[in-house]
Image (tube, rainbow, N blue to C red):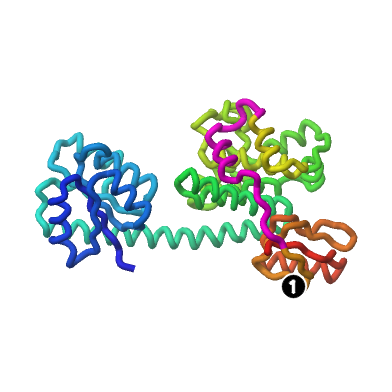
Amino acid sequence: MTEKILCVDDEANVLAGFQRGLRRQFQIETAEGGEPALALLEKGGPFAVIVSDMRMPGLTGLQLLQRVRQRWPDTVRVMLTGNADQQTAMDAVNEGNIFRFLTKPCPPDRLATTLTAALEQHRLITAERELLEHTLNGSVRALTEILSLLDPETFGRGQVLREQMRAVAEALKLPNVWELEMAAMLHGLGQVTLPAEVAVRARLGSALSAAEETMVRRVPEAGSNLLAHIPRLEPVARIVLFQSKHFDGAGFPLDAPGGKQIPDGARLLKVLVDMAQLEARGNSRLDSIAQLRTRAGRYDPEMLDAVAAVLGAGAAKPTASITFKELKPGHVLVSDVTTTGGLLILAAGNRITPSLLERLRNFAALSGVKEPIYVEA
């Protein structure tokens, strides 16, 4: 696919000049001002490079490039301005993370050279990101496979939370949704550090000793520490660490600040996890959200409102009844899978993977699997 360049200026004749001078070498699109540029980025992206004039009425070039940096970080940003003072240049580099800063009038050959370099920079950025995501996906896949075998219930809950996290984060236009999804899926990773009997009693709400309560309270920290050893997963580890922190500053970590200083993903994850716990006790989606609203100080109101708006009443997905032999990788369980004797093998919410299917086959050979099995249609 041809890499697109977006040129932004409030003067139509300048934009026409861009088209005439650059269209033979590059795929150029134009926007007359900052707001039209944002609309074009939303509907016509992605763009490899954006070139913006500094001084425009309404949304300035610097403000535009700041938003581009937050919303489309892979887009390489170039600033054009007739004001070459040092402070303007410093602001452009520091606040907009500008790749190049050019002064007007800019000779066509210099602009073309800059755009060629910017496109190469974009290729390097995307290649590094794709390599990183491939490597991280392998590491995360290994972690989730292990978690699915050691603690199927926590793994299944994480799969559901991941989908919910993605839906709400995209509605809020939060950056780095992939990191938020990973944090949701791996939020319970620290559970593997608990002794089996403690994990069971904590899940059932049974009485715990003071030492056991401390273990359970530190589960987010344990999960965060495990993730922190994987390069580039530090933001995910931080979300996992803060998942139990209250918006008013209470909760774990005890000495950490509250409010907007808690990562966005952690504030959203807190709402989703607590909502899931209420639903697991038999509450409807609407009743669960209503109960969350009564817990003063625990949640970011913005996140709670977004969850209510996006997930709403939690409309049920169509289900299908199948036999064990019909179960395949990719199926999502609607109900728990148990042995014929009632032992839980896989919890509802799990997406069947080859390793999980192998686990089921082993149980089927030894103890039998209760049928039918209910999956998303």
347 lies above or below 252: below
**Toward the viewer: 87 or 268?**
268
Q: Which residue is mark 1?
A: 326
Report the residue at 66% width, 46% height from top.
Answer: 190
| Number of marks drawn | 1
Give the image location of residue 151, x and y in percent: 73, 53
Report the residue at 17% width, 36% height from top.
Answer: 86
Residue furthest out toward the bottom: 325
Q: Secondary structure at mark 1?
A: helix
To which quarter of the image does residue 210 belong? Answer: top right
Give the image location of residue 128, x and y in percent: 40, 59
The stretch of residues the image draws in magenta is 294-319
Q: Which quadrant: the C terminus?
A: bottom right
Res. 229 visible in picture: no
To which quarter of the image does residue 97 belong? Answer: top left
Q: Is residue 133 left or right of residue 20?
A: right
Report the residue at 44% width, 62% height from top.
Answer: 131
359 lies above or below 231: below
Report the residue at 75% width, 62% height from top.
Answer: 374
Give the image location of residue 207, x and y in percent: 83, 34
